[in-house]
Image (tube, rainbow, N blue to C red):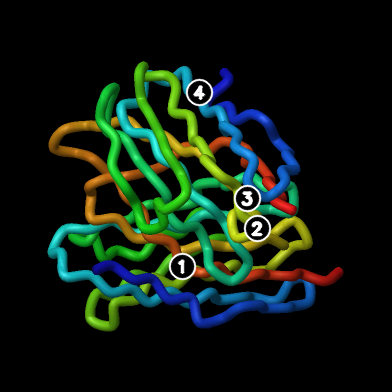
Amino acid sequence: AQKVTQAQTEISVVEKEDVTLDCVYETRDTTYYLFWYKQPPSGELVFLIRRNSFDEQNEISGRYSWNFQKSTSSFNFTITASQVVDSAVYFCALSDGAYKLSFGAGTTVTVRA
Amino acid sequence: NAGVTQTPKFQVLKTGQSMTLQCAQDMNHEYMSWYRQDPGMGLRLIHYSVGAGITDQGEVPNGYNVSRSTTEDFPLRLLSAAPSQTSVYFCASSPLRSGDNTGELFFGEGSRLTVL
């Protein structure tokens, strides 16, 4: 069975602070995919990143960066120099490649001006 | 581009009533699925389909039916609504690429259902 744990329920920061969202996953599969989605207050789900289990390179996209460590089964997400527009619920998700995604409970990020 | 379209966006039902949430996609995606989102629980898979005529159960299928008569449409039916089905429902689709499937989902905007 697959499981995704996002231990942080809510994080509140002041604008320009960095924020790191933790994601720990469990799977028996050797091939799997990890995702992050953003859900802004408007409610839609926005795809942020996909990483497969064979690619442990960290990735940076603007102010967003992701740290994938198979040794600790973690796929953490950092927002650098946070902005008010980053306020959202962030979901980590896991797929075995068979299309079904298992989502974590989500972390609500509030960035205060 | 329409993408994934869900209707209605909001619905209030009384316990015991039935209704259908509609989902349509215009991207010719083979895979379609329904999730429900509840506070503190993330998104949980209800039913999914890998093509017309093929459906299967997800994590929380009880109380819901689906059918897939065309590639484009994947309606979700509540047979006898219960207050526990109060939730936000998301339809999602994905292309199936043999040998390179990545599982990325394209989501609709969601349907908020309240059962009184």
Residue occupying the point 23% across, 81% down = A71
Q: Are marks 2 and 3 on the same chain?
A: yes
Q: Alpha-carbon neighbours of circle 4 within 10 Å: few (<14), some, or many (≥20)?
A: many
Asked whether the beta carbons under mark 1 and mark 4 sit within 8 Å of each other, the answer is no
Q: Are marks 2 and 1 on the same chain?
A: no
Tell me if residue A37 comes above or below residue B41 in the rendering.
above
Mark 3 residue element: strand
Residue tagged by mark 4?
B24
Disc 4 marks a residue whose amino acid type is Ala
Tell me if residue A6 comes above or below residue B46 in the rendering.
below
C-alpha distance separating marks 1 and 3: 16 Å
Q: Inspect this view and state whether residue A62 appears.
A: no
Of circles 1 and 3, which is in front? Answer: 3
Mark 2 residue element: helix
Residue occupying the point 50% across, 38% down = B91
| Mark 3 or 4, nearer chain start | 4
Q: Quadrant of residue A44?
A: top right
Disc 3 marks a residue whose amino acid type is Val
Residue occupying the point 29% across, 22% down = B52
Q: Are marks 1 and 3 on the same chain?
A: no
Q: Could you tell me residue B89's position as x and y percent?
A: 57, 46
Q: Inspect this view and state whether residue A98 appears.
A: yes
Mark 4 residue element: strand
Residue tagged by mark 3?
B88
Residue tagged by mark 2?
B83
